[in-house]
Structure formats: structure tokens, C-alpha cells
Image (spheres, grey):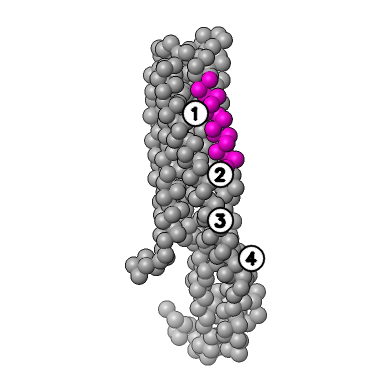
Amino acid sequence: MGQHHHHHHATDADVQGNRRRLSIALALTATYMVAEVVGGLAANSLALLADAGHMFSDAAALGLSVMAVTLAQRPATMQRTYGFHRAEILAALVNGAALVALSVLIAREAWERLAQPPEVQGGLMLAVAGGGLAINLANLMILSGGRESNLNVRGAWLHVMADTLGSIGAMSAGVVIYLFGWRWADPVASFVIASLVLYSAWGLVRETLDVLMEGVPKGISIQDVTSALEELPGVLDTHDLHVWSLTSGRNIATAHLIIAEDADHQGIIDAANRTLAIRFAIEHATIQVEHDALASQCNPCGPAASPG
């Protein structure tokens, strides 16, 4: 049991760390987003405004994530026995859907601008995009600590990653416009930014839908779990095995085990829980054990007696 408590303490520390990371990134992003809107309007650059739009979605994403992390810490209630952990997944989904919409809007505007590229101030565009890049790189470093273990932080990190590439796109366009006066570089950079946004959003939406549809968590194979349980001494068969995620990093399982008549009932449940926790990071499992008495009595009964 000691191991179990230790796991929760680590999680609490992680949660506090994630909240702090997300809050710092949110403050930086929101501040620079305003600068990018002002710069984009002054330079007449769609790529900068697209990047600012992306930064706005970043700020919204980070805000949602901070809110979700805070909500997820609220204790379970009589009505919500699992607490508010799914708030994180819903935040990630809203986030991903908003990004898909944003990328479509940017692409449409860029397409219209390609026909008649307006005058853009390349030098100003380059300077503003450079500042954006610096902020994004700082945010990437801040958020990278929690992105492996938490889908919500990973969603925020992906936003910032796509945004970093967007800043590079806007800077490149700024250089090209400044040096050669090629105004089409601005809508082209906007297309690149839109595709990056769409790409990062699509992966996020797919993963959050997997969790909401109670799919088997990534990295866990039902066959492996079944084999691991059936290898336990005294276990004859496994059925009704379900594995799903409550939220990123919190996996749950239920299973029925058929065990030999003389097997140690509690011993098998303990062993099954231990195996699931250690091998598959399933921290909450409900194991139901059935004795094989009925099966052995009914062997001579023929098919009519088999439960239908």
C-alpha cells in the first residue's frame, strides 16, 4: 500500500508544477499577443496577425488548461464520484476544435490576399516576429517538463510549438519582404502557419476523443493485460476486461477472473492489482473473482447447461 500513497504524493507535486508552468506561460503569451496584434496592424501583415491569432488561441488554451488543472484537483462529490478529472480532457478538446477553426480562417484570408498581396512593412514584421519567437522558445522550455505525463500540458506545449514555427515563418517572410519586396511571402507564410496549426490541432482532437470514447490508453495492449493476468498462479481465465483513461495518466481497469476452486481468493486479487499497477500503470482496478466450481460441475452436463 505504501507504494500507492507515494504515487499520489508524486501526482500532487506534478499537478502543482503543471499549474505553475501553465500560469507562467499564460502570462508571457497574453502579454506578447497584444504586441503582435499592434505590430501586425502597423505592418499590415497577415502572417503577424495569424501568429497573433495563434497566440490568442495559445492564451485561451493555457487559460483553459490552468482552469482544468485547478478543477481536476477538486475532491470527488456524491454526484461526481470520479471528481472533476475529465475537465482537463474537455479543455483539451475545446482547445483542439478552436485551433481547427482558426486554421481554416487564416487559410481563407491568405488565399484572398494571394491574388492581390498588399503592401507590408518587412522590417517591422521581422522585429515583432523575432520577439514572438523569443517568447515562444521560453514557453517551450517552461512547459516541456510536464508534457510527457499530461495530455493537457502536452496540448498547451503543442500549441506553443506550432506557434514557434509560425514565428519562424513570419520572420522568414519579413526577411524576404524586407530584402526583395516580395509581398506574396506574407500570405504564403500565413498558409504555412495555418497548416501547422491544423496539424497540431488534429492530433490533439483525436487523442482527447480516444479518452472520451473510453478507448484503451496508448501504450497498453489488451492482449498483454490478459496474458499478464492469466499468468498469475490459480487464474484459469479472464473475461470482461476493460481498460480506459479517466484523464491523461490515470488509467482504470475492470476484469472478471475465473480461478481454480482451491485458489487463494484475496491473494489473487492482490496479485492482479499489483501486476496492473507495476506493469501497466493502472492505478485503479476492480477485480471480480469467480470460482471454477460451476464449470467443473457442468463438464458432463453438455451444451444445454452452458450459460446462454
Where is residue 81 shown, x and y percent of the image?
A: 39, 68
Tag 3, which secondary structure? helix
Tag 1, which secondary structure? helix
User: Residues under labels 1 and 3: Cα distance?
Assistant: 32 Å
C-beta proximity under 8 Å, tags 2 and 3: no
The answer to which of marks 1 and 3 sits earlier in the sequence is 3
Answer whether residue 244 is visible to the viewer in this image.
Answer: yes
Magenta range is 127-143
Task: Please give the label number shown on residue 279.
Answer: 4
Image quarter where the N terminus lies is bottom right
Residue at image point 55% right, 29% down: 133
Can you identify the residue that label 1 sits on? 193
Residue 220 figure quarter: bottom right
Can you identify the residue that label 3 sits on? 14
Residue at image point 43% right, 52% down: 68
Where is residue 277 shown, x and y percent of the image?
A: 59, 68
Can you identify the residue that label 2 sits on? 143
Total of numbered circles in the picture? 4
In the depicted structure, whether residue 219 falls above or below residue 59? below
